[in-house]
Amino acid sequence: MPKLRMKTILIGIITGFANGLFGAGGGTIVVPAMERILGVEEHKAHATAIAVILPLSMISAGIYMQKQAVDWSTVFYVSIGGVVGGYIGAKILNKIPSKWLHKVFGLFMLVAAIRMII
């Protein structure tokens, strides 16, 4: 198997593990990995991450549903907001310059990390 394909599969395994373990967070791994290891352009890495996370989240959600660990009323209301936010974010992604997209994503990751520590 070619080296690039192995790297891509390894990134997928790590991303899937994080997504399954934490319930989310795969994007914080897959976006920088696609950019730095696979050389994917920043905007394309963010868009591709969404497509990658969908099947991972479906598998994880299925396992959590089997364990009856899902709060369905929360799923409903958060999903409404998530659909609206996802639509808006997807529409403006290509309008944000790569330099700013990188900085905003990094800032978002830092804020999330600080909130988890405190």
Image: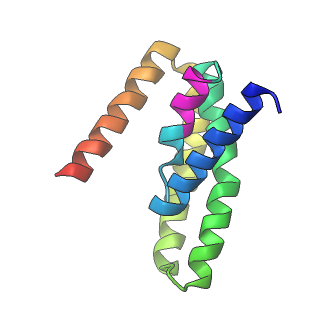
Task: Estimate the x, y position of residue 78 in percent, counting from the top left.
Answer: 48, 64
Task: Estimate the x, y position of residue 3 in percent, counting from the top left.
Answer: 74, 26
Q: Is residue 48 visible?
A: yes
Compared with 77, 46 (above or below) is above
Q: Is residue 94 visible?
A: no
Task: Estimate the x, y position of residue 49 in percent, counting from the top left.
Answer: 62, 39
Q: Which residues are magenta?
A: 30-37
**Rendering quarter of residue 58:** bottom right
| Residue occupying the point 47% across, 23% down | 101
Indicate whether residue 88 is drawn in magenta: no
- For the N terminus, the image quarter is top right
In this picture the colour scheme is rainbow
Q: What residue occupies the far left of the structure in this picture?
A: 118
Compared with 57, 77 (above or below) is below
Horizontally, residue 96 falls left or right of residue 116, namely: right
Magenta part, dominant SS = helix
**Rendering quarter of residue 22:** bottom left
Task: Give the total of numbered labels.
Answer: 0
| Residue occupying the point 51% across, 29% down | 32
Q: Could you say which is closer to the camera, residue 9 or residue 35?
A: 9
Q: What residue occupies the far right of the structure in this picture?
A: 1
Horizontally, residue 116 falls left or right of residue 13, namely: left
| Residue occupying the point 55% across, 33% down | 31
Q: Could you say which is closer to the camera, residue 85 or residue 9?
A: 9
Q: Could you say which is closer to the camera, residue 71 or residue 83?
A: 71
Task: Estimate the x, y position of residue 93 in percent, counting from the top left.
Answer: 57, 28
Horizontally, residue 22 falls left or right of residue 15, namely: left
Horizontally, residue 10 falls left or right of residue 24, namely: right
| Residue occupying the point 52% across, 16% down | 98
